[in-house]
Amino acid sequence: MRRLMLPFAVLFLLVAGACASAGGGSGTSRNSNRITAEELGTVATFSAYEAVRRLRPAWLRVRTQAAPPVVFLDGVQMGGPETLENFRASQFREILHRSGPDATTLYGTGVAGGTIELVSR
């Protein structure tokens, strides 16, 4: 019975993977938790703060009873969102966002408002 199940399981995974990657639309997909180098190129002359404000404004909104997001630069904690003003968008390969629960799992307490993670070029 297991021998019969394996081909069906493999087929299911292939079909599910194809459907998930098919997307549709313009051919470029936008991840709500990641700003790519391509997107950063459109705002390269702006500060990282302005880039995030224009491309993913929800990352900067403080939820009720939550702390503001904490900014990390290549894994090193830098400060609050205002820290983004000190950097140009062109300095980064990508900018990532983690929700409060995901950030707390990764970094521990003190990041309940989530994180904005800058990844240098």
Image (tube, helix red, strand yellow):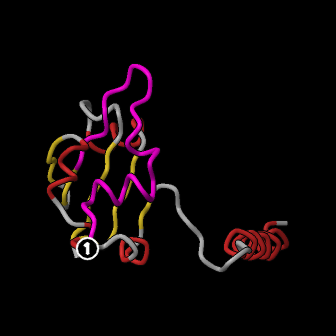
Q: Give the amino acid type for the residue marked by disc 1 in the picture.
A: Ser
Q: What range of the chain is rendered magenta?
A: 45-71
Q: Nearer the viewer, residue 84 or 99?
A: 84
Q: Is residue 3 above or below residue 101?
A: below
Q: What residue is shown with label 1?
A: 90
Tell me where residue 100 sits by quadrant: top left
50 falls in the magenta region: yes
In this rendering, is residue 82 above or below 19?
above
Q: Is residue 47 left or right of residue 94?
A: left
Residue at 38% over, 52% down: 53
Number of marks in picture: 1
Determine crowd level at label 1: few under 14, some 14-19, many 20+ residues with C-alpha closer than 10 A: many
Decide if residue 50 is on the left or right side of residue 59.
Answer: left
Residue 85 % position (x, y): 19, 53
Q: Residue at x 82, y 72 (%)?
A: 8
- Position of residue 7 measured from the top left corner of the image (x, y, whole percent): 80, 77
- How far from the left and from the top, in percent, is residue 105? 35, 40
Task: Locate residue 36 relative to residue 68 in the image: left or right.
Answer: right
Quarter of the image that includes the C terminus: bottom left
**Which image quarter: residue 75?**
bottom left
Q: Is residue 5 left or right of residue 84?
A: right
Instruction: Tell me the SS state at disc 1.
Output: helix
Which x, y percent locates residue 112? 34, 31
Q: In the current view of this chain or complex, which residue is farthest to the top?
A: 65
Identify the residue at image location x=28%, y=53%: 49
Given residues 85 and 78, the one toward you in this image is 85
Task: Name the quarter where the N terminus is drawn.
Answer: bottom right
